[in-house]
Image (cartoon, grey):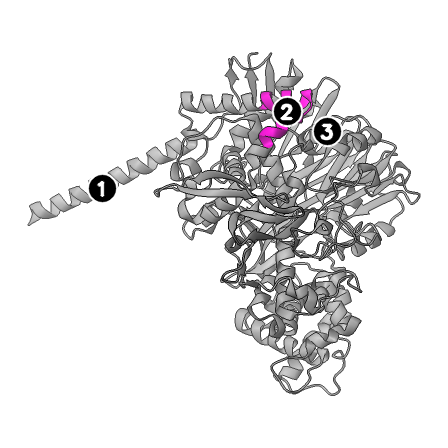
Amino acid sequence: MPYTINWVKGFFLLILGLIILFVIFIYFLINQSIPNYNKNYTLSEPFGSIEIIRDRHAVPHIFADDKRDLFFGLGFSHAQDRLWQMMLSRRLAYGELSEVFGQQSYNIDDFMKRMDLKRLSSLSLQYQSQRTQEALVSYTAGVNSWLNLINKGSHGRGAPEFFSYGSPLKKWQPVDSLSILRLLGLQGSSQIYEELLTLKTILKLKNNKAFDLFSQEINPNLDINSQLLAKYNNISFTDGQQLNVDSSFIPIQSRFNLQSANLISISSGSTVKKGSLLAHDLQSILTSPVEWMLARMEFPNGGVIGATIPGIPTIFSGRNTKIAWGLGNADADQVDLYLEELNPANNQKYLSKNGYKLLYTRKTKIKIKDKDDVYIDLLWSDNGPIMPENHLGVIFKEGSKNLISIKSNALIENDLSMTASIDLMLSNSVIEALEVSKNHVTPIKNLMVIDKENIAYKLIGKIPKRNIAHTTKGQFPGIGKNQDDRWNGYYEYETNTISVNPSNGTILNTGNKNTNDKFPKNIAYKWKDTQKIHRLRKKMNNREIHTLESLIEIQTDTVSYTARFLLGLIAKDLWYEGEIGPTGSSKFSRQSILKQLSTWNGDMDGSLIEPLVYNIWITMLQKRIIQDELGLLYNQYSSFQPLFIERVFKDINNASDWCDIQQTTKIESCNQLAKDSLNDTLTYLSKKYGSKINNWKWGNYHKAVHFHNPFGTQNILHWLFNISHNVSGSKYTLKGGKIKYSNDDKIISSYGSVYKGIYDMGDPDSSLYIISTGQSGHFFSKHYDDLSKLAKDGDYIPMSLNPITAKAGALGIIRINN
């Protein structure tokens, strides 16, 4: 018996020892993939010597003998810190995620294969300027040089994720960078999602009430009648779609997830240091690491510093010695969907403007991990690629001969957006920056640019020309065969909205409406912002002279104009209800919380109770208003819409009809729905967070979460890979964040500020910037989340082009051929 016990003990000790050795071995391999920032390399690819100084925040400052080698150094640095991100972006662009993730990514790959971005980018390479082509080649060499060093030096495959999702690391190519940039163009518009949702809503309601939810104009310029609806008799819809719009992989962006920016420029006459100021707050889906990486390149005529995207050889937003600039997506209407009609006698032909025409067809395959390859037919009409109906959440009735095609400026062959971006970062004046930006194609963006004396705003990108007789005015899928529904090219760059040195000395943009033109020159039906701009204007008007500190205050402001405005509407008949209700009654609780809300200034600070009550109340109210009409389709309206609530409570165009619950015989009023929703809110909060109202602090339950792909959703690993912290603010505050509700009683902001920069051309080296995670994509690195702690507290890091500052406290210097 003792012999058996000793044998069992020995066996378990052996197993334990093997486990410990295995863990140590895995840790060793993973640790090997953390790059060494202090090393010398002798390489054959660069034209000369390169020096990469990693400052104390791991920002690479790149110096080189030959300006082409600056892009080599950027590619080298990107691959060192963000190799997994780069490879993932390339796989998404090419429809190759399933090679590593298996069947779960098939629908995304199927969609992206049909976009054919690699072919289009290969064609566009020849159109880029010589400087851009050289940059792409040098950047590619830098990436591949690091890949070679990984293979030779056993650097743990370059990123820990590759241990779980291993696959051969293909060499980088110039077309890869162009394709990722083109992918950003496709993801820079919510129009595919919006057109489909508009169509689903119209088919559900069958009247103009749909425009209460979609149009920001009081009077829609289209009538939903039986004649128009007859064109869509062959279509029904599902309540969802197979592509998950909450995923950061998603190629079809919802408005909820679309990148936006707050942009402020102030002329030199209104600043302390007599140089123009620019503040740039970029907001998007929160990922871990964040999409952006900080970098600096020192060109012969001066340095450029700011925000880059690994995989692309340019600084998208930042400053050089002469100018500073910021960009934000405008969500302009740069996409149209079309209902195509097949020939009943030949499915290879579709009805075009000149009769039946052959569809362009090409076969390709999707590789799926642990499964057989799937071959698909890529189909294109004159309008664009044909999409399977299951991707779009629509269903064509049995026997119908319809397809849906996509027309997008992201699918233009001659796309010079890469050339425009590189030329912009090397511009020497506002005038030059505006001129070179004419080559930008997609997505349509708001550009704000300053030099020491001048400030300017310009809408950049190719805006489609539509016909006044367009069947749907571009609001939902048009008819493919109709010439009136097709684009007539693009508007000239010179006609895009512009503002240079306005008399009031400031230019503000939050994605808000900036033109009064009607269709077809309207640019957008739903502008990215209608609310934050009011708060921003008020904050700007409070001061005559601005500084870096005043702009920091604005970027961290948590007061919601929307909250105060909507509360005044929905609670106008609730503030006073006569005598106080009995203690403990629903009336007493309602009156108590209304008393607090009546004096609340809309501050979404984490220490307050009111933000939590307000958010739950307004969300429940919108659900109560629209769910009876929309049914399960309501799930695609989870984010409340202030203009819709305003329209309903002001009864614009009889919009108060929405408040009447269709399933009841009596007629409900908006006031009654507001009261019932508040009662439900208080009941919900008591069950979720306890009956003590003083514990309902917004910051206790509101968290910003940067989700990692792919480990961020896995219960075992999410705590290791995700970056999260409690936050203030909300969707409609200048310190932005859009919320969703989790299963653990937390309110999650999965969207928020990812890059902030404040540029002072009166004292350029005092400029500041920050990203919301860290520079490294390696979760074992101390630079994986170090900047997130600063960003959470509203802090920034210096944005200096002084080499001495970069070397002060530097983590190390990489010398190549030096």
Q: Earlier in the sequence, mark 3 or mark 2?
A: 2
Residue linked to disc 2: 126
* Residue 415 pos. (x, y %): 67, 33
Q: Quadrant of residue 433?
A: top right
Instruction: Reply yes or no: does residue 430 show up in magenta.
Output: no
Q: Which disc, if any, is residue 397?
A: none
Pick the front one: 559 or 638: 638
Whether residue 292 is visible = no
What residue does disc 1 label? 15
- For residue 587, what is the image quadrant? bottom right
Question: Alpha carbon of mark 2 to alpha carbon of mark 1: how far?
Answer: 59 Å
Give the residue type at disc 1.
Ile
Query: How many C-alpha atoms fall within 10 Å of the one at disc 2: few (<14), some, or many (≥20)?
Result: few
Q: CA distance from mark 3 to mark 2?
A: 21 Å
The residue beneath circle 3 is 425
Callout 3: few (<14), some (14-19), or many (20+) C-alpha neighbours within 10 Å? many
Label 3, label 1: how far apart the Cα atoms are: 58 Å
Asked whether disc 3 touches disc 1, contact meaning CB atoms under 8 Å apart, the reply is no
Classify mark 3: helix, strand or loop. Answer: helix
Q: Nearer the viewer, residue 319 or 45?
A: 45
Residue at horizontal 45%, vertical 47%? 106
* 685 with respect to 766 (left or right): left
Q: Amino acid at mark 3?
A: Met
Provide the residue span drawn in magenta: 121-139
Which label sits in the foreground, 3 or 1? 3
Find out whether residue 136 is within the magenta segment: yes
| Residue 450 in view | yes
In terms of sequence position, does the residue under pointer 3 or pointer 1 come before the other?
A: 1
Front residue of 714/392: it is 392
- In percent of width and height, residue 746 lies at 54, 61
